[in-house]
Image (cartoon, grey):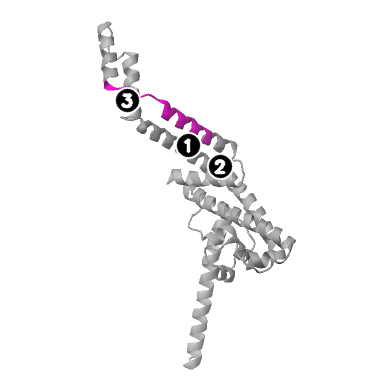
């Protein structure tokens, strides 16, 4: 999964026009360098190997210490029969280095995602003030409200996509680095919602639906992700305790039980 997660994060940064912290950017550049190296190594045939060994023997040397023999054997080991082993191995080595850089600088990467997400959320909130409670798919009704609504609608669509992209990258970053649990509900990734609002919009709500429901787009950090998870669990437990208490009180009342 490492390559897929890295690919998702890289794709998001490109789409939102954001730059990685320098150590992460260097690790990504190193991956491209490794990919080029993996594709450029010629894989000598067995005939080449035996010819080199013969040359070493006939020249009075030791074929086990001959530099040309060693070079050919090394190329064959690294590249396998087709060279694919080297390309794959180097790409995996590069991916591990990117994963390590992302893990070390997870908070810095997350801060960039948060800045883009929260800015997009502010645009969604401003657009909502103009468009009102219409769904973004209701283009004809929105465009009928006039040029200001049309501009707000266009901005909201772009911003909603930005939030979605950053949310996906957040999940990949959490899954890859373990900076927090990746199982946090998508809606809670992008907004701090009370229980009633969360249940109204659902666990994987669209950014626009969260804003329409009165929520504020606010990408979770390492700290707030845990707070939202525990807060949600606590709210569920509190409601359950309240319901259990109400049931017990009603049971006692209807059965004339005191105490």
As helix, strand or loop, the secondary structure at mark 1 comes to: helix
What residue did someone put label 3 on?
76
Asked if residue 241 can be seen in this view, the reply is yes
Magenta stretch: dominant SS?
helix
Residue depicted at x 57% and y 51%: 166
* Along the line of sight, the residue nearer the viewer: 85 or 148: 148
Q: Is residue 42 magenta?
A: yes
Location of residue 20 (image quadrant): top right
The answer for how far apart the CA atoms under marks 2 and 3 are is: 37 Å
- In the rendered structure, the answer to whether residue 85 lies left or right of residue 31 reads left
Residue closer to the observer: 109 or 30: 30
- Residue at the location (25% across, 7% down)? 58
- 10 vs 195, nearest the viewer: 10
Q: Earlier in the sequence, mark 2 or mark 1?
A: 1
Magenta residues, as a range?
28-46
N-term mark: 2 or 3: 3
Q: What x and y, as percent, mark residue 162?
A: 60, 53
Residue name at image x 25 percent, y 9 percent: 57
Q: Nearer the viewer, mark 2 or mark 3?
A: 3
Observer-side mark, 1 or 3, equals 3
Q: Secondary structure at mark 3?
A: helix
Q: Which residue is mark 2?
A: 105
Is label 2 in contact with label 3 (beta carbons under 8 Å)? no
For residue 97, the mark is 1
């Amino acid at each position: 999964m490492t390559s897929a997660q890295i690919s998702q994060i890289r794709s998001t940064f490109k789409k939102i026009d954001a730059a990685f912290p320098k150590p992460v950017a260097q690790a990504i550049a190193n991956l491209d360098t490794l990919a080029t190296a993996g594709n450029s190594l010629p894989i000598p045939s067995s005939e080449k190997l035996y010819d080199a060994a013969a040359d070493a023997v006939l020249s009075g040397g030791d074929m086990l210490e001959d530099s040309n023999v060693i070079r050919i054997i090394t190329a064959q080991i690294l590249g396998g029969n087709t060279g694919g082993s080297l390309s794959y191995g180097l790409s995996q080595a590069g991916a591990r280095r990117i994963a390590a850089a992302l893990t070390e600088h997870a908070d810095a990467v997350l801060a960039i995602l948060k800045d883009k997400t929260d800015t997009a959320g502010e645009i969604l909130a401003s657009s909502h003030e103009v468009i009102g409670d219409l769904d973004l798919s209701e283009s004809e009704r929105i465009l009928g409200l006039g040029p200001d609504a049309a501009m707000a609608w266009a901005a909201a669509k772009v911003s909603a996509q930005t939030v979605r992209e950053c949310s996906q990258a957040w999940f990949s970053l959490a899954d890859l680095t373990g900076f927090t649990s990746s199982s946090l509900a998508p809606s809670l990734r992008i907004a701090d919602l009370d229980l009633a609002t969360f249940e109204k919009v659902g666990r994987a709500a669209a950014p626009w639906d969260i804003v329409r429901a009165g929520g504020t787009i606010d990408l979770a950090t390492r700290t707030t992700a845990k707070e939202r998870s525990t807060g949600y669990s606590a709210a569920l437990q509190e409601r359950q305790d309240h319901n259990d208490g109400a049931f017990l009180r009603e049971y006692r009342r209807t059965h004339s039980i005191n105490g």
